[in-house]
Amino acid sequence: MSMLERLCRNPQAVIGFAMIALFLLVAAFAPLLAPNNPYEQNLLHKYGGPDSRYPLGTDQLGRCVLSRLIYGARYSLGISLPVVALLGAIGIVAGCFSACAPRAIQTALRYVCDVLIAFPAVVLAAAFTGVAGNGIATLVVSVVVSMWAWFVRMAGAYARVEMGKGYALASQIAGCGTPGLVFKHIMPNILPQYLVYLSTGVASMIIMVSGFAFLGLGFTAGTPEWGAMLNEARKSLYAHPELLMYPGLCIAATAAAFNLFGEALRDVLEQGEAR
């Protein structure tokens, strides 16, 4: 039985994938699904209850809550997925080549990673924002700079395990150079495990991006992003708690979807290795 067939037979994987597909479709077709302009203000209808025009009511500026939630998927997934893909590419290339490098280079890279990992991502994001100003590009740069070391370390750990196996030594004896060893042998063998890490990494990235938005980093005022919506709703915590509940549920559900799929993928891989 192939890995795809085992995934299709795993209820957790099916549920996680279905949730991911749903959020991706919402993000892709946000202009068609949103009942109103997410930026349009109507102060005469602020804190309005649900009705035919505003299915989930309005916020403190009279903006459609449902429309802002729908567009929020674009920001959370539209930033998290490309950033994790970029970090994943950096991590697997640097990690695999470092596993084949001399011990001195491995030690130097490990020290660099340790230094970067010691700095919280929010500190670097705040520093970049202070220098370059608020903006999504600044947020992306700060996340990549602060997080690449984690991906390099993880990919390097997987690659070093593969380097200790007989086929890697046999390939080197047969005259396979470092690029060939990395791209033809090491990467294909660590990719399934690495995809599990990337899937759970997307969940962490969604929470991180929303956390930055909650702190006012990376997004301009009024951006329909889930973390920013949480920040704006703090002022009406007791009077209108639903304004915090809606974006909080979106963040939790999206992160849970990627975690469910990632854990199911790990279980499937472990079953395949046991066989």
Image: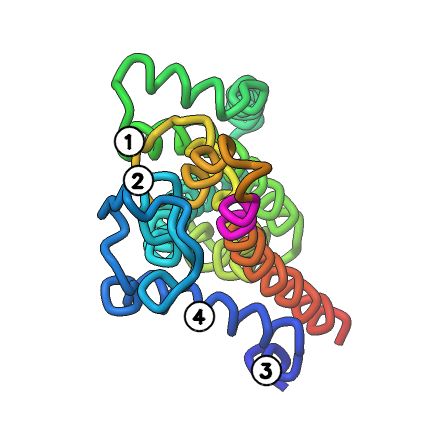
Looking at the picture, which amino acid does disc 4 mark?
Answer: Ala
Q: Specify which label sits upstream in the sequence, 3 or 1.
A: 3
Instruction: Determine the main secondary structure of the stretch shown in magenta.
Output: helix
Using the image as rendered, state which of residue 117 and residue 136 is in the foreground. Answer: 136
Q: Position of residue 230 (x, y in %)?
A: 48, 39
Using the image as rendered, state which of residue 203 and residue 180 is in the foreground. Answer: 203
Question: What is the distance, in whole Å, between disc 4 and disc 3 at their CAs?
Answer: 15 Å
Q: Which mark is residue 8?
A: 3
Magenta span has 245?
A: yes
Residue shown at the point (46%, 46%) measured from the top left: 92
Q: Specify which label sits upstream in the sequence, 4 or 1.
A: 4
Q: Secondary structure at mark 4?
A: helix
Q: Specify which label sits upstream in the sequence, 3 or 2.
A: 3
Question: What is the distance, in whole Å, between disc 3 and disc 1 at their CAs?
Answer: 41 Å
Task: Specify start and end residues of the magenta stretch as a single range.
Answer: 241-248
Q: Position of residue 168 (x, y in %)?
A: 57, 53
Question: What is the distance, in whole Å, between disc 1 and disc 2 at their CAs?
Answer: 6 Å
Using the image as rendered, state which of residue 247 and residue 173 is in the foreground. Answer: 247
Where's the N terminus, which quadrant?
bottom right
Instruction: Name the residue tied to disc 2.
Output: 223
Instruction: Name the residue tied to disc 4.
Output: 21
Residue at the outermost front position:
44
Q: Secondary structure at mark 2?
A: loop
Q: Secondary structure at mark 3?
A: helix
Residues tagged 1 and 2 counted as in contact (Cβ below 8 A):
yes
Instruction: Name the residue tied to disc 1.
Output: 220
Q: How packed is label 3: few (under 14 Cα within 10 Å), some, or many (20 or more)?
A: few
Residue 248 vertical position relative to residue 50 in the rendered view, above or below: above
Q: How packed is label 2: few (under 14 Cα within 10 Å), some, or many (20 or more)?
A: some
Q: How packed is label 1: few (under 14 Cα within 10 Å), some, or many (20 or more)?
A: few
Mark closer to the observer (4, 1): 1
